[in-house]
Image (tube, rainbow, N blue to C red):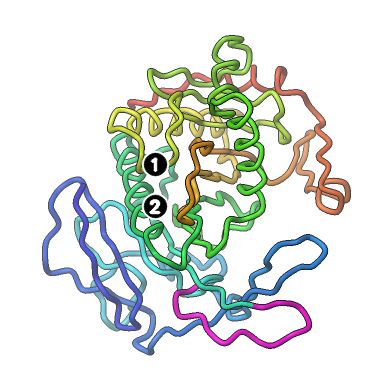
């Protein structure tokens, strides 16, 4: 993997990645030359015991622009700068213009609850220059490069003192809140371990202390042994609908070995993660013959300086709503009480995914 690091006129970083060497003559564009100085902050929620990020400037971010005004399009036109330059790059990463977390955050307001600067980072990961593509429909070698990029960002962001957790994710489809059609994901680098990964790590730690093994590894091994909910069975990685799936069509992807992060995977394991991911995403789209809206969430070891032998990298994919003939958004029990009620069982819905034939190498 090759990369080129540039600085935009407004001070934000842009990193271009490719499988071939990149030229030296890239010029990083930005929508404005004014210095970018967002200042988000955190407020403590005393009942939930967690931080809430406040970033009012996000109200002004771009929302579903037409293709001719795509801010992620590559350009050489200085009169109409977007975020990315033209040239032979394959994946691009840049600091979000509207971040919820920023390295320069400072001076949070004094309130009746604890507050703190929302330090950290928010990066946009542009998967491809092809605005009509999708992550699952990219060539396998390109998906492999994206996995390598996730590993690279984990190492660099995780080395920062203001970052405790590196979280790559993708929102796919307007149904789950995407604001730009161009195929892209994001990476949030939090100054704390977020509540959902923290709760998972708590359970993983308890299992590690009790059994001396990875909880995710044991779940993966059981699924492979039962072979009921398996979606992909590779030499290093498995994809399966978990026995405890909260969403219809929820799938987890996990290496068989208890690797803590993308960066800790071997080259062969990364390639198998890419094959598993492409397989699942193609099955999603093939399920009804239409683009499938989903959330892709990558859970890996914190970078908070503590030891985390319990952490086992895994990717969780699910729609942001349940389906029963039509769209149904999460409602009172799920959002207000945190108790999910599933309208289907994994053993039934997994057979629909298993029946979808895909060609990963096409």
Crowding at label 2, few (<14), some or many (≥20) Cα neighbours within 10 Å? Answer: many
**What is the spatial separation of the Cα atoms under label 2 and label 1, in whole angstroms?**
7 Å
Residue at 35% x, 83% y is 10
Quarter where residue 11 is shown: bottom left
Q: Which mark is residue 262?
A: 1
89 vs 5, nearest the viewer:
5
202 vs 340, nearest the viewer:
202
Up the image or down, 125 lies above or below 43; here it is: above
Residue at 22% x, 50% y is 18
Magenta part of the chain: 102-115
Q: Position of residue 71 (x, y in %)?
A: 42, 69
Q: Which mark is residue 154?
A: 2
Residue at 43% x, 71% y is 69
**Predominant secondary structure, magenta span:** loop
The answer to whether residue 145 is left or right of residue 65 is left
Q: Position of residue 358 (x, y in %)?
A: 45, 23
Q: Position of residue 117 (x, y in %)?
A: 57, 78
Up the image or down, 156 lies above or below 33; here it is: above
Q: Disc 2 vs disc 1: Cβ atoms closer than 8 Å? A: yes
Up the image or down, 85 lies above or below 300; here it is: below
């Amino acid at each position: 993997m090759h990369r080129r690091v540039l600085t935009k006129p407004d001070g934000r970083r842009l990193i271009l990645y490719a499988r071939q060497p990149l030229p030296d003559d890239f010029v990083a564009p930005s929508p404005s030359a004014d210095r970018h100085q967002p200042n988000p902050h955190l407020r403590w929620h005393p009942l939930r015991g967690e931080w809430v990020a406040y970033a009012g400037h996000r109200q002004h971010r771009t929302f579903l622009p037409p293709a001719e005004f795509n801010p992620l399009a590559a350009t050489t036109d200085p009169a109409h700068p977007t975020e990315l330059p033209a040239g032979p790059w394959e994946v691009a990463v840049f600091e979000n213009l509207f971040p919820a977390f920023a390295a320069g955050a400072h001076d949070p307001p004094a309130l009746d609850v604890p507050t703190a600067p929302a330090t950290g980072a928010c990066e946009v990961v542009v998967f491809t220059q092809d605005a009509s593509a999708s992550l699952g429909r990219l060539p396998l070698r390109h998906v492999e490069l994206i996995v390598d990029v996730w590993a690279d960002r984990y190492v660099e962001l995780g080395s920062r003192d203001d970052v405790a957790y590196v979280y790559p994710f993708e929102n796919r489809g307007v149904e789950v809140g995407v604001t730009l059609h161009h195929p892209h994901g994001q990476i949030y680098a939090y100054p704390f371990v977020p509540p959902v990964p923290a709760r998972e790590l708590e359970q993983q730690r308890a299992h590690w202390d009790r059994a001396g093994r990875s909880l995710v590894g044991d779940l993966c091994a059981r699924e492979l042994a039962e072979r009921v909910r398996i979606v992909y069975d590779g030499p290093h990685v498995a994809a399966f609908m978990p026995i405890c799936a909260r969403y219809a069509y929820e799938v987890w992807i996990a290496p068989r070995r208890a690797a803590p992060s993308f960066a800790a995977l071997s080259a062969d394991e990364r390639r198998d993660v890419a094959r598993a991911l492409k397989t699942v995403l193609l099955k999603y789209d093939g399920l009804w013959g239409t683009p499938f809206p989903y959330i892709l969430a990558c859970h890996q070891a914190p970078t908070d300086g503590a030891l985390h032998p319990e952490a086992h990298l895994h990717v969780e994919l699910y729609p942001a709503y349940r389906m029963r003939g039509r769209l149904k958004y999460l409602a009172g029990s799920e959002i207000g009480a945190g108790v999910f009620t599933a309208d289907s069982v994994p053993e039934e819905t997994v057979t629909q995914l298993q029946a979808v034939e895909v060609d990963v190498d096409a």
